[in-house]
Amino acid sequence: MTGGNEYHKYDMARLHAELEQEREVEMLEESVSDLRSTLCELQERLHSVDGENEWKTRYETQVELNGQLKRQISLIKERLEDLRLASIRSYDEMSIETLRQRLKLLTNDKSDLQTQLKDCRHQIELEGKAFHKTNDERRAYLSEIAK
């Protein structure tokens, strides 16, 4: 019965994380909408600008965009921190057995990735040797042709 309860807690944590992710997506969509409206306003201003005010308008535009970007960065950092803390809380709520299972899965993933890395390194080494051999043969042919 305890295992089912732990999975329920884990599901709740997962749902909470998904909810946070949806909130972040909504926030990003809102930011995109704000940027689009700002872009439309700026395009209207751009078309109505004289030659004398062009640099002033560019400066004001850049300052406004910088401010928006700073606000977005701040919001995204807050969301990331919230998501990080939510994941930590979900691990805090898990039982020792569930954490052990999770650790076992992560250990297996780590082992698989290490094996894959080792295979990639070996493949790179083989391709390097083949490249050098082919390059040496090419040089030999070029020197024969030059004679």
Image (cartoon, rainbow, N blue to C red):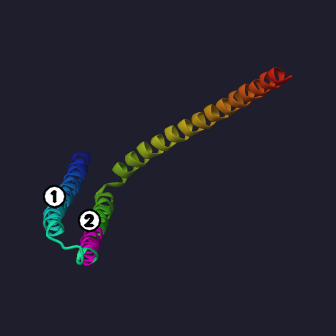
Look at label 1 and name its amino acid. Glu
The residue under label 1 is 26
Q: Position of residue 126 (x, y in %)?
A: 67, 30
Residue 65: quarter of image: bottom left
Look at label 2 and name its amino acid. Arg
The residue under label 2 is 79
Mark 2 is surrounded, within 10 Å at the Cα level, by few (under 14), some (14 to 19) or many (20 or more) other residues, namely: some
Range covered by the magenta-colored residues: 56-75
Position of 115 compared to 65: left or right? right
Give how far apart the Cα atoms at labels 1 and 2 are. Answer: 12 Å
User: Which residue is rendered at x = 50% and y = 37% of the image?
Assistant: 112
22 shown above or below 80: above
| Residue 78 belongs to magenta span | no
- Mark 1 vs 2, N-terminal side: 1
User: Which residue is rendered at x = 78% and y = 21% of the image?
Assistant: 141
Position of 89 compared to 24: left or right? right
Disc ID at residue 102: none
134 shown above or below 1: above
Q: Position of residue 46 (x, y in %)?
A: 18, 67
